[in-house]
Image: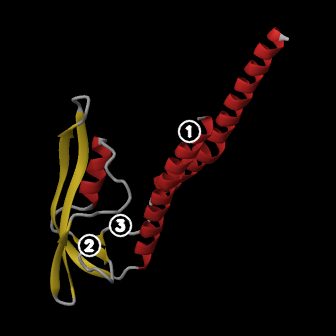
Amino acid sequence: MKENILLISSAVINVFMIGYLFNMFRNIRTYFWPVTKGIIIRSEIDISEDSEGGEFYGVLIEYKYSVNNVKYQSDHVTFALNDSGNRKHSEKFVTKFPENKIVNVSYNPKDHKSAILQPGFRAHQFYLLFFLLFCFYIWVPIGWLAWAWAWAWTQSQVLALWF
């Protein structure tokens, strides 16, 4: 039973890490996307209610751009997580991308509908990656070993009482 729990939890952790690494590589590839000019058509703070009834602040930034005389519209600022729930963080995005501002738009050369304003990855993605690697591949196995050792030690103590 113990081996099954370890196997299942390891599989879940590895699937999560593969997904996270895939997202990181997708963000890195955006550095090499072609760039065109676009214009911000909407820039505002999106306020919604979180699970505890408090306010959650996000951003809603829409822009238009064209590639090969075909017009597109998008609302992706970055593929990285950029909604922090923090009002000041959201205000920084709205200030950086005000309405009617001409901006550089990076677009996917294979799918021109896929575009972002901030290509690449953010520092917090690396911090999270290193934290996850430490937790999943160092701290958790050490915890499993400590638990297994403690369980084996208690079993040997129980056996010592009988003999």
Give the residue at mark 2: 103
Most extreme residue toward the bottom is 68
What's under tag 1, amino acid-wise? Ile
Is 106 in front, or is 94?
106
* Relative horizontal placement of residue 115, taking residue 127 as reference (left or right): left
**Residue found 77% across the figure and 22% down from its top:** 153
**Which numbered marker is on residue 5?**
1
Q: Nearer the observer, disc 2 or disc 3?
A: 3
* Relative horizontal placement of residue 19, taking residue 113 as reference (left or right): right
* Mark positioned earlier in the residue sequence (2 or 1): 1
In this view, 118 is above or below 154: below
* Relative horizontal placement of residue 143, taking residue 158 as reference (left or right): left
What whole-number distance in Å separates the C-alpha atoms at marks 2 and 3?
10 Å
Is 69 in front, or is 96?
69
Say few, some or many: other residues with alpha carbon within 10 Å of mark 1 (under 14 / 14 to 19 / 20 or more).
few
* Relative horizontal placement of residue 57, taking residue 140 as reference (left or right): left
Badges 1 and 3: C-beta atoms under 8 Å apart?
no
* Mark positioned earlier in the residue sequence (1 or 3): 1
Q: Nearer the observer, disc 2 or disc 1?
A: 1
Give the residue at mark 3: 118
Position of the C terminus, as image quadrant, is: top right
What's under tag 3, amino acid-wise? Gln
Is 31 in front, or is 97?
31
Residue 38, horizontal then vertical, whole percent: 22, 76
